[in-house]
Image (tube, grey):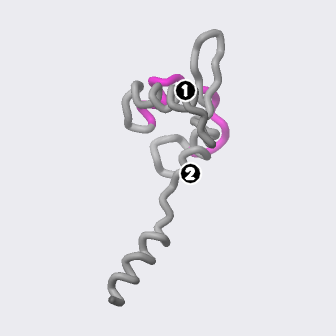
Amino acid sequence: MNDGIAAGPDTGLVSIGKLAQLLDCSPKTIRDWLYKGRKQPIADPLPYYRLNGLVRFRLQEVRAWIERRRVRISSVTGVAERNQSL
């Protein structure tokens, strides 16, 4: 996966700031995702750990969470093909 998150073996835990940097978003966005998952229980919240008040993320789990949100190209291609045949 070439998304800025290093591939390979489990690299440990990262902070909100480091995860935001890797995902090219703001730390506030990460906090919003966490708050949304706590405020309104959702089926698949962003996985995180709380260690003595610190929030940390395991990169391997975040990668899997991102992959579950991948937009399937085949569904978009199918719509384009149907539109062309009309």
- In the picture of the structure, the residue carrying the numbered disc 1 is 39
- How many neighbours does mark 2 have within 10 angstroms: few (below 14), some (14-19), or many (20 or more)? few
Residue 53 versus residue 2 in the image, above or below: above
Residue 26 in the image, given as x and y percentages of width and height: 37, 29
Q: Name the amino acid, label 2.
A: Glu
Check if mark 1's residue and mark 2's residue have beta carbons within 8 Å: no
Q: Secondary structure at mark 2?
A: helix
Decide which of 31, 67 is in the foreground and name it: 31
Q: Locate residue 64 relative to residue 5 in the image: left or right.
A: right
Residue at x-position 38% and y-position 37%: 24
Measure the alpha-carbon separation of dots 1 and 2.
23 Å
Q: Which element type, helix, strand or loop, lies under badge 1?
A: helix
- Is residue 56 within the magenta segment? no
Q: Would residue 33 be found to the left or right of residue 53 on screen?
A: left
- The residue drawn where x is 34% and y is 82% is 83
Frontmost of labels 1 and 2 is 1
Q: Residue 44 at what x, y percent from top left?
A: 61, 42
Question: Which residue of the protein is positioned furthest toward the top in this rendering?
Answer: 52
Instruction: Name the residue beneath numbered marker 2.
Output: 67
Residue at 65% x, 15% y: name it: 51
Report the magenta residues as a range. Answer: 7-22
Task: Residue 74 in the image: state x and y as whole percent.
Answer: 49, 72
Viewer-nearest residue: 8 or 49: 49
Please give the name of the residue rendered at 63% of the width and 42% of the height, measured from the top-left corner. Answer: 43
Q: Which quadrant of the figure has residue 56? A: top right
